Image (cartoon, rainbow, N blue to C red):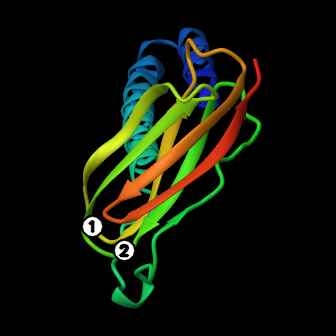
Amino acid sequence: MDRAWRTIALLGLLSLAFGPRAQAQLDTLSQRLLQLDQVLREAVALRVLEVARYLVSVEDEAALPRQFALFPAYPNPFRRQATIRFQVPEQVRARLEVYDVLGRRVGVLLDEELRPGVYEVRFEAQGLASGLYFYRLTADDFVQQRKMILIK
């Protein structure tokens, strides 16, 4: 993105050197570059939001998970945020919670009806002290808990 802005600045300087006709052409080119930059920024932001919310949108029935699973958080240990992946083999109400070492709930990351698939949720640790935390996935009769370490 920085390269696009540098190009626009360079084009502006060139337009000053070559007069009004060149400036009009460069202004048109600058506008096109700015539009392209905006489109790219929006596309990247949308894609990042999709990845953060749902890792996989399952289109192939054969690719559906066959069992519940809660995977290790990564990175672990982590500084600001950790990513937690899990999978559900059937439509189910799922709840993903985070607890401190004393068993106090510090957050509910997810509490909703999910379709079969693999999911990824980002845990933001703002305002929390360094230490050991546990995250627990509850979905029907399935309950699994894992630990992660916050280092500040």
Say which of 145 and 148 sits in front: 145
CB contact under 8 Å: marks 1 and 2: yes
Residue 137 relative to residue 60: left or right: right
Task: Name the residue furthest front.
Answer: 102
Residue 126 pos. (x, y %): 56, 17
Residue 71 pos. (x, y %): 60, 59
Residue 110 appears in which quarter of the rendering?
top left
Q: Is residue 89 above or below residue 145?
A: below
For marks 1 and 2, give the CA distance. 9 Å
Q: Is residue 29 visible?
A: no
Q: Earlier in the sequence, mark 1 or mark 2?
A: 2
Residue 93 appears in which quarter of the rendering?
bottom left
Q: Which residue is mark 2?
A: 58
Say which of 48 and 151 sits in front: 151
**Residue at position x 32%, y 72% from top?**
116
Residue 76 relative to residue 88: left or right: right
Q: Quadrant of the N terminus?
A: top right
Disc 2 residue type (three-letter): Val
Q: Residues within 10 Å of mark 2 (few under 14, many from 20)?
A: some
Q: Is residue 21 above or below residue 108?
A: above
Q: Which residue is mark 1?
A: 115
Residue 133 appears in which quarter of the rendering?
top right
